[in-house]
Amino acid sequence: VVKLVNWGAVVLDIVLILVAFLLAYVLRYQFQWLREVDPAYYTTFVPYIPMAAIQGGLTLLAFLLSGVYRFRRGASLVDEVYGVINGAFSGFVVTVFFIFFWRPLVYSRLFFLYATALIIVFLIAARLLRRATLRVLRARGFGVDRVLIVGSDDVGLTVMRNLMAQPELGFEVVGFVDDDPERGSTNIGRFQALGSTANLPALLRSQQVDEVIITLPWQQRRQILAITGQ
């Protein structure tokens, strides 16, 4: 599980959550947005540190449990945004629950509402920036995996076209192999025919292939097992 978690993203989120709480304090007590603070209840940021740590920890825990840090190629932005919003509100709800029963007079509910809104904005912005950066880097060839397709029928052709149409995924199709003599020797547009599956061991080395995608139908399961055993 540890290998599936992007710990760099976790550290960045911790920093952004801290900034969100600090800015929430400024908005609530310096600018006094939405409602003025009674001078009798004016306080420094220090009393908020324990509850801010609790809410931040609960938010990160919700992210970890819901798989927010398990970045997958092809994952939609909608899924990422939903994960951030759901995790942030989970932390907020539990924190407010504690405050409701504890009822410390020093705490402002608006402070935690501001902090939650800022956490959502900052973390979504960070993910948008990450996506934009990856798109630029992959367009220049950085972090791109070279892919070899097995099978050039309708399924194989669809896979190749989808990978080419979505360069942000970070895949480069080096070509395809097919045991049909005609298909295995006939290029399909920009997709290069590289012979039959017997050439796979040599092609993996000569083409510096990172991944192999098998698109053969399930009826050819024996051939699939033979290929995966190479």
Image (tube, rainbow, N blue to C red):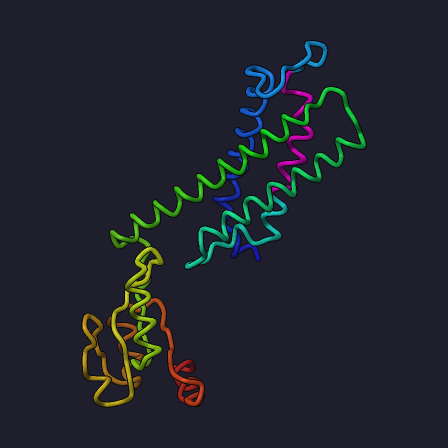
Q: In the picture shown, does residue 5 fall above or below 125?
A: below
Q: Residue at x 65, y 15 (%)?
A: 37
Q: Residue at x 65, y 36 (%)?
A: 55
Residue at the front extreme of this rendering: 34
Residue at the top extreme of this rendering: 39
* Nearer to the camera, 177 or 125: 125
Image location (x, y in percent) of residue 8: 48, 44
Q: Is residue 11 magenta?
A: no
Q: Residue at x 31, y 82 (%)?
A: 153
Q: Residue at x 71, y 34 (%)?
A: 96
Q: Quadrant of residue 179?
A: bottom left
Task: Name the main secondary structure of what is drawn in magenta.
Answer: helix
Q: Quadrant of residue 88?
A: top right
Q: Could you tell me how many numbered marks the image carries?
A: 0
Q: Quadrant of residue 176?
A: bottom left
* Nearer to the camera, 134 or 82: 82
Which region of the structure is painted magenta?
A: 44-59
Q: Is residue 58 magenta?
A: yes
Image location (x, y in percent) of residue 132: 35, 45
Q: In the picture shown, does residue 63 fall above or below 204?
A: above
Image location (x, y in percent) of residue 149: 32, 75
Dividing the image into 4 quarters, which one contains the N terminus? Answer: bottom right
Dividing the image into 4 quarters, which one contains the C terminus? Answer: bottom left
